[in-house]
Image: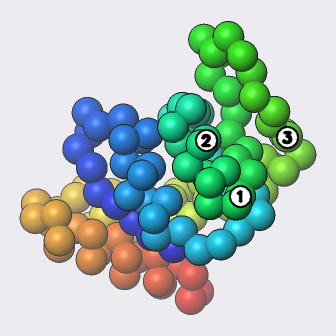
Amino acid sequence: MAFLLTGGQVADCTAADTLLDQMPATLVLHGDKGYDTNAVREKIEAMGAAPNIPPKTNRRWKPCFSPVFYRDRNAIERMFGRIKDFRRVAARYHRLEQNFLAAVCLAAIICYWL
């Protein structure tokens, strides 16, 4: 599992390049609509994985997408929801990036452990 903190105004697809470098080998990679760009899809395919990202509504050419496989992605959304149960993370008491990232990682470890 890898986390990357970005500013609120930064698009998801710009941070995808850094996150994909930390990704282990996999067959199918699920992603949110925010990662639906040609560059992200090409990088995923270059890594030997199949991107399963729902296409944006304004896309002219709709790439293949499997809603059956995408159902497994709800585990990711539940994990983020569980992390936000920790008050320190949800309220972002830590103003320094490294301290906040450490709090997010600790919360993820506790969620995974319990």
Q: Is residue 23 left or right of residue 75?
A: left
Residue located beneath label 3 in the image: 66
Q: Earlier in the sequence, mark 2 or mark 3?
A: 2
Residue type at mark 1?
Ala
Camera sees residue 57: yes
Residue located beneath label 1 in the image: 49
- Relative to 113, does residue 42 appear above or below in the rendering? above
Outermost residue on the front side: it is 46
* Cβ–Cβ under 8 Å for marks 1 and 2: no
Q: Residue at x 37, y 48 (%)?
A: 15
Q: Residue at x 67, y 10 (%)?
A: 60
Camera sees residue 74: no
43 vs 97, nearest the viewer: 43
Q: CA distance from mark 3 to mark 1?
A: 14 Å
Tell me the element at label 3.
loop
Instruction: Give coordinates of residue 51: x percent, y percent.
Output: 70, 47
Residue located beneath label 2 in the image: 41
Residue type at mark 2?
Arg
Outermost residue on the left side: it is 96
3 vs 44, nearest the viewer: 44
- Relative to 59, does residue 35 appear above or below in the rendering? below
Q: Earlier in the sequence, mark 3 or mark 1?
A: 1
Badge number at residue 17: none
Residue type at mark 3?
Ser
* Cβ–Cβ under 8 Å for marks 3 and 1: no
**In the rendered image, which quarter is residue 59 located in?**
top right
